[in-house]
Image (cartoon, rainbow, N blue to C red):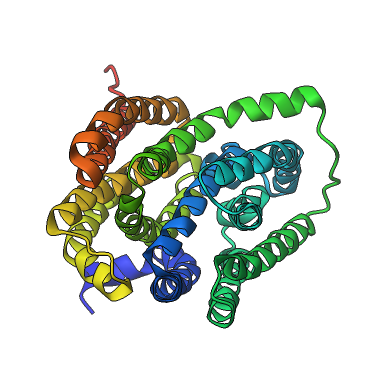
Amino acid sequence: MPLPLRRLFSHALFRRSALFSISVIASTVVGLVSIKLITDVLGTAGWGNLYLLQAINQFASILVAFGWGATGPASVAALAPEDRRQFLVDSLFARVPLLLVVGPLAIILGIALGSDPAMAILATLTYTVPGVGAAWYFVGTNRPLALLTYDALPAILGQIAGLIAVVIVPALWAYLAATAAFTMGGVLVGLIVALRGQDGARLHRPAPSALAAEMRTQGHGLVTLLFGNLATTLPAVLLQIFSPTAVPVFGMVDRIFRYGVIVLGPILQAAQSWVGEQADLLRTRARTVMWFSIGIGLAGGVCFATLAPVFSQLLGSIEISPLLAVIGAIAFASECIGQLVGLAGLVALGQGRVLSRSAVAGAVVTVGLLIPATGFGGVTGALAVVALPLVGVAVWRATALWRTTRPTPTLE
């Protein structure tokens, strides 16, 4: 084996990415099969309804997670081992009350957009409840097998059970009932395992003032994910209101985009736990991640443009045109760079404000242009408005990281 490749495969970042990939590969394969089967059984309208409920509740899950899903892995990786479980406990005292408020709101929105109440409730249990889970904690503590066992595996088994259920009972509620049961079980067991550490530290209820301070530190992560996901959630809602028949097409592009981001996940998870481990190597590792992100983004964009039309034909009767595939590829390449540079590099460097500001700016541009773009350009216009800000966000974050990691000149 050539020496450069041997060094690559022996690199800690590569090894961690490979371990975190186990859950991603399994989740992606099952997810792609579920799109095909649900489309065949329930039709494109049924799958479009499921996609809309997923979009609403995944956005709600970000609200419930309150930034820990974004900045939590890097934060917990930098803590002393005896302080990590208390960090998780603190987050639960913030996130569980949020679930009790945000969950009902997601149900109401799903019903308002035409879903059956039972399906809206089950979708919230499936896709919003993971916001209180321990997945980010397992990432930050470099426990890929725990992530697979208590986060990915329940979701995979739930999808498989849901597909069996929807074949027996061809109704969306049957699929969601199965996925909800497995998801909630996985979240509960995962939290129990995460909190049963052997570090000897005594866990306690956080003081209100300390909890409020901790929530403020998570603000940048919350804003980053919240406004970043607004760019894909809002188009789905607007299309459902103004052009319901276009939702499945946009949903197919977005779903392939999100599966691509899931594939990116192991690299992001490995980078988040790797960059912040050694303070003396922080800047060097952050810049290394930036160069990795550019290469991964370019490769991912080419794969998206080439394979998205093929996948759309294999997964159902929803066709993605070459133009939509190219626009989606630009968006995906930019997302790869923006996520890796931001969530792995800038967070570890204490530059979370750059994440939130860039995410807000991108969302403002998207929201400002979305209604006219959707009205005049339909799905193409909506997707183009999603892609354009992602390019700007990626450039903004990469530039900020480059400036932050420049060597400080010394006076002789």
> In x, y percent, where is residue 86?
76, 43
Residue at position x 66%, y 53% in the image: 121
State left or right for residue 150 relative to residue 394: right
> In x, y percent, where is residue 369?
26, 28
> In x, y percent, where is residue 69?
55, 45
Q: Which is more toward the observer, 270 or 406?
A: 270
Residue sitting at the far left: 322
Q: Which is more toward the observer, 285 or 144?
A: 144
Q: Quadrant of residue 88?
A: top right
Residue at position x 29%, y 72% in the image: 6
| 183 shown above or below 132 | below
Q: Quadrant of residue 11?
A: bottom left
State left or right for residue 398 relative to residue 153: left
Quadrant into which the N terminus falls? bottom left
> In x, y percent, where is residue 239?
35, 43
Residue at position x 78%, y 59% in the image: 192
Q: Which is more toward the observer, 101 or 261?
A: 101
Q: Which is more toward the observer, 114 or 19?
A: 114
State left or right for residue 257 relative to residue 129: left
